[in-house]
Amino acid sequence: MLGREADSPRGRIYQILQVDAGNLEIGDSFVTHIDRCLGCRACETACPSGVHYGAILERARYEIETHYRRGWLAHKIRDYFYREVLNRLPLLARHARLLRFYQRSGLQALARGTGLLRALGMAKLEALSPAVDDDFYFRELGKTYPAKGEKRGRIAFLAGCIASVSFAELNRATVRVLNENGVEVFVPEAQQCCGALQAHGGYREEAKALARKNIEAMLDPSCDAIVTNAAGCGATLKEYGDLLGDDPEYRDRAREFGAKSKDVNEYLAKLGLRDPKRKLAARVTYQDPCHLAHGQGVRSAPRELLKAACAQMVEMAHPDFCCGSAGTYNVVQNDLSMKILADKMDDVQTTSADVIATANVGCMLQLRAGVKQRGLKMRVAHVIELLDEAYR
């Protein structure tokens, strides 16, 4: 997007090497170039040498958070979000209820209508905030949902943090689809946030603490897999072995946890779908989430499921180019994010699709913003939501 060597993967690795060798300080310039990275890991797909750029980037960001002092307000907000809100699900739920009140009480309409958000420079960011659900998924933690017909598997389901307050119906659809395919679904009660946003943001110790809690809560020998419907979460779950590689107590279990972790598309495609009752009469195009295509190497599985659920599927140009969401990137690097989204929407529009399907909640929010900006009559949906409708 910027055409600068310092903002390319190679350029960033060079800077990281210089910092590591003591030839470059962790100062404003270094932080700017590292912060600008989406962490989409498309460079890993492209790299003929198999460089694990994502692991390098996360460690560089940890060094930044350890040795660099951001502005007072940015530091406080980041600390509160990464160390408190995402680490304590009851606190997240309280914040979600406050946001829901703002969205539904008329305050949101008032703030938008009066131009207050524009005056405060917050209009673009506020537009990206997810709609908060009526019924949070947290109340379903600890439950087990039986398989329909012949039992073909049993999985532990990661409900997610943001997903539990803004995509609870997607979680319920995921459980229904798994049950429909003969899979018993166990939703461990003590599960926590996966730690993806913390790891990507440089809060590596917080991510490690959450990984340990999830290993204790979810590594159940009676389950043949640990399943998530969010690509960003799945990539991190699979990399718990790297995250806890220096922890002698958890290292082996972390590797086992990573090996058992599966994206729901990946799990269902390998299991083999039971035929849905119908195919949806919709023209669908698919956007590859970066952490599914590049981070996990899962590309064909979502497409197989879409072909089973939908009457017509058409590929967009550059389906695995990032949409610009990238965790919190669309908030902290909003201008760049919107430019990246504009390119993505150009590709989407050429398909003349009725539905944009994807497999990550962050991508869904970003693509919905793109559809709204362009005034398009397109629906944005998760692959599993479409499959659930085909079964029902």
Image: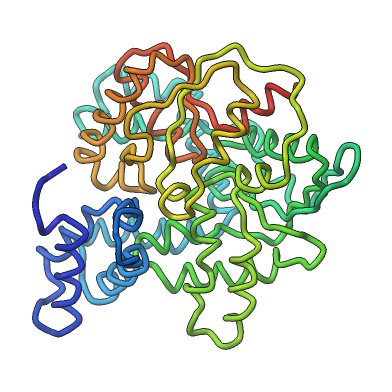
The number of numbered badges drawn on the structure is: 0
- Please report the residue visible at 29 percent of the width from the left and 70 percent of the height from the top: 65
Residue 175 spot, x, y in % from top left? 73, 40
Residue extending farthest bottom: 248
Residue 4 spot, x, y in % from top left? 9, 52
- Please report the residue visible at 60 percent of the width from the left and 59 percent of the height from the top: 192
> What colour-coding does the image apply?
rainbow
- Identify the image quadrant of the N terminus: top left
- Please report the residue visible at 50 percent of the width from the left and 28 percent of the height from the top: 357
Q: Using the image, determine if residue 173 lies above or below residue 314.
A: below
Residue 150 spot, x, y in % from top left? 90, 42
Residue 80 spot, x, y in % from top left? 40, 59
* Towards the viewer: 23 or 275: 275
Q: Using the image, determine if residue 291 lies above or below residue 247.
A: above
- Direction from residue 143 to residue 352 in the image, left or right: left
- Please report the residue visible at 45 percent of the width from the left and 22 percent of the height from the top: 314
The image quadrant that residue 201 belongs to is bottom left
Q: Using the image, determine if residue 245 lies above or below residue 76.
A: below
- Direction from residue 230 to residue 158 in the image, left or right: right
- Identify the image quadrant of the C terminus: top right
